[in-house]
């Protein structure tokens, strides 16, 4: 049933993509650009009217005032930093591009509001510096797209007050270092990608095209036609329920550039070509909210972090969704106020969103409030189920579990794995993101980024099934292209449950395998694995990865962390080998280093499993349930 639903919504997303392509591809002409392009400055996301409204909101709205003060502090801190230089890290210029766009966004936003010349002077110096780089590293085109966005907003939000020579230099750089190279085949493999590269590159280049459209309307038309025809390919991956396949961090990355692009199209041309209506895109705001545990940490599956890369980025992005959904719950003003004050105190550099976020945040007042669900499922390429505490419970129960497959963008062999929190402690953990530069040096580009079954990627603890809380059969890797689908989900008030088909992960080794998660109470989770063994089944290992202290008991394990305890109890079969394996240090010297990391396992021989019908029943119980 659920597979049918997925196919139905995927078909709808594909139909929408085709409709967008048919309606707009190659329909934006040079004349259309000339006719519809707004002439006032600024025209990218901000407008003269919105800028005046923001200035008034800074005086009247404490939230907007706090955020602007944070940006102002950032702008002052930039004045004492050295001017950016073209310094590569491995094969990337990305760190410099991101510093550039952050600086330019902050400086131009604060200048547009304050009219203080010192910020314009420094903005001018930064733009001249990066526009005189030999290139923006087109071999890794994310670097180009982000730099192009930074230069574009620096030009637009400075309200034509930069020196004419700087404006000419910057527009020339945008054309020659970003827009024209994007049509070269060796640099443009991202154009039809399904992942974040599609969104970031089309987003950054579309905004650059708008900035130069007054002088290069034909080039701008080509860029916009290509973007509007192809960005739906990436946005279709959000369907049907909003689950971003690459995880929380890449949701923030890809979605941020999509929102910037949509907002820029709307401000410059009064249309976003209905791209926001692609099924699943708006719903992804709920996905991110549900992905956040009571601890405030994300479920960091795939190459994701447990926290925002930029301190306020989640709030900034969700402010846009709050306005679109008319739901104030997506932008918790009290939480944001505390986070903004902390970011200011800690002197965190503001995100790439700065001025755009100032616009979105200022529009969140007086919205109605709509509650989020306690339990949720999200289907698609990487299906998830999430159970949270009931409204008046103090247990802080949180389960997030997933299916999916390893051979998709940024994939791990983590199907069947789960995050579990109780009483403020994250007991079952995911390793998430491990830095790329060192791994590319150790494994090579193909070694790290290939997801074939023999890839070196799967030697890494952070990527293979031995570093995740899932099942392993015969001590072997999961099938890289095995797809674990969501079979059913029951949204019960007291006992929600969901089941994944793990069979495709173990071809030949198992005839069938399902994993069912069921919330038994506010303090107890049941994980039931039902396996059909074959003649090739030798052993099955149930594993949980944790940072808690662990000891073996008669029933299983007792975990201790932050003054709390959790019992991990094996109910069936009883004759399993229990083991605690330290992963600190990890197996390989270039593996991810995580303090106190360990893997607790129940290892069962095939014969013992057969005696119990191939079922493994494990309970995770808090202090009140032992």
Image (spheres, rainbow, N blue to C red):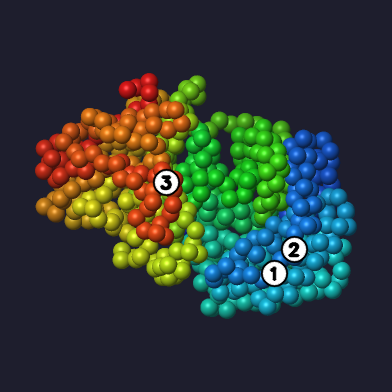
Placement of the C terminus among the 4 image quadrants? top left
| Horizontal side, residue 107 vs residue 477: left or right | right
Q: At which x and y percent is residue 142?
A: 58, 66
Residue that mark 2 sits on: 82
Q: Secondary structure at mark 2?
A: loop
Question: 6 or 516: which is nearer to us?
Answer: 516
Q: Answer yes or no: do the residues labelled 1 and 2 have beta carbons within 8 Å? A: yes
Distance of label 1 from label 2 (alpha carbons):
9 Å
Q: SS class of the residue under badge 1?
A: loop
Marks 3 and 2: in contact by CB < 8 Å?
no
Disc 2 versus disc 3: distance between alpha carbons? Answer: 38 Å
125 or 588, which is in the foreground?
A: 588
State the image quarter where residue 265 is shown. Answer: bottom right
Quadrant of the rendering where the N terminus is positioned: top left
Which of the pair 160/128 is nearer the observer?
128
Residue under label 1: 85
- Name the residue that disc number 3 marks: 430
Q: In the rendered structure, which disc, 2 or 3, sits on the residue that comes first in sequence?
A: 2
């Amino acid at each position: 049933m659920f597979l049918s639903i997925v196919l139905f919504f995927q078909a709808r997303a594909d139909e929408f993509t085709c409709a967008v392509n048919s309606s707009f591809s190659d329909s934006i002409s040079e004349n259309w650009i000339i006719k519809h392009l707004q002439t006032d400055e600024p025209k990218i996301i901000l407008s003269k009217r919105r800028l005046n409204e923001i200035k008034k909101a800074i005086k009247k709205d404490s939230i907007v005032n706090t955020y602007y003060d944070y940006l102002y502090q950032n702008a002052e801190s930039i004045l004492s930093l050295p001017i950016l230089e073209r310094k590569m890290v491995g094969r990337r210029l990305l760190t410099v591009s991101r510093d550039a766009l952050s600086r330019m966004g902050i400086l131009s936003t604060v200048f547009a509001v304050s009219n203080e010349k010192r910020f314009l002077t420094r903005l001018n110096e930064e733009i001249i510096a990066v526009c005189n780089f030999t290139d923006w590293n087109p071999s890794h085109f994310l670097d180009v797209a982000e730099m192009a966005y930074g230069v574009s907003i620096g030009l637009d939000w400075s309200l034509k007050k930069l020196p004419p020579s700087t404006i000419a230099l910057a527009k020339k750089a945008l054309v020659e270092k970003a827009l024209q190279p994007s049509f070269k085949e060796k640099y443009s493999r991202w154009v039809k990608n399904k992942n974040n590269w599609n969104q970031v590159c089309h987003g950054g280049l579309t905004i650059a095209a708008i900035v130069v459209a007054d002088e290069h309307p034909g080039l701008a038309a080509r860029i916009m036609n290509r973007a509007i025809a192809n960005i739906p390919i990436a946005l279709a991956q959000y369907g049907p329920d909003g689950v971003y396949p690459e995880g929380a961090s890449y949701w923030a990355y890809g979605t941020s550039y999509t929102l910037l692009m949509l907002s820029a199209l709307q401000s410059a041309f009064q249309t976003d070509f209905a791209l926001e209506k692609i099924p699943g895109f708006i719903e992804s705001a709920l996905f991110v909210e549900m992905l956040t545990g009571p601890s405030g940490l994300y479920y960091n599956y795939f190459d994701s972090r447990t926290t925002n890369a930029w301190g306020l980025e989640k709030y900034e992005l969700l402010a846009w969704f709050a306005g679109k959904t008319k739901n104030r719950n997506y932008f918790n003003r009290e939480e944001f106020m505390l986070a903004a004050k902390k970011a200011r105190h800690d002197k965190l550099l503001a995100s790439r969103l700065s001025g755009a976020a100032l616009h979105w945040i200022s529009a969140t007042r007086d919205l109605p409030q709509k509650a989020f669900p306690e339990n949720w499922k999200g289907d698609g390429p990487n299906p998830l189920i999430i159970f949270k505490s009931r409204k008046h419970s103090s247990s802080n129960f949180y389960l997030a579990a997933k299916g999916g497959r390893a051979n998709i963008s940024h994939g791990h062999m983590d199907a069947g794995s789960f995050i579990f929190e109780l009483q403020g402690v994250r007991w079952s953990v995911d390793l998430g993101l491990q830095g790329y530069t060192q791994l590319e040096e150790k494994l090579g580009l193909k070694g790290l980024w290939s997801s074939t079954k023999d890839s070196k990627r799967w030697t890494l603890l952070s990527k293979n099934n031995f570093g995740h809380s899932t099942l392993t059969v015969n001590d072997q890797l999961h099938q890289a292209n095995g797809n674990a689908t969501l079979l059913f989900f029951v949204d019960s008030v007291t006992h929600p449950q969901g089941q994944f088909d793990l069979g495709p992960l173990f071809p030949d080794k198992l005839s069938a395998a399902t994993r069912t998660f069921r919330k038994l109470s506010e303090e107890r989770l049941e994980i039931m694995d039902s396996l059909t063994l074959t003649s090739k089944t030798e052993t099955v290992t149930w594993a949980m990865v944790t940072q808690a202290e662990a000891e073996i008991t008669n029933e299983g394990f007792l975990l201790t962390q932050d003054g709390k305890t959790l019992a991990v109890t094996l109910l069936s079969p009883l004759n399993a080998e229990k083991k605690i394996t330290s992963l600190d240090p990890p197996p390989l010297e270039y593996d991810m280093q995580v303090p106190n990391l360990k893997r607790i396992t129940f290892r069962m021989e095939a014969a013992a499993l057969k005696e119990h019908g191939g079922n493994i029943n494990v309970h995770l119980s808090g202090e009140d349930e032992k």
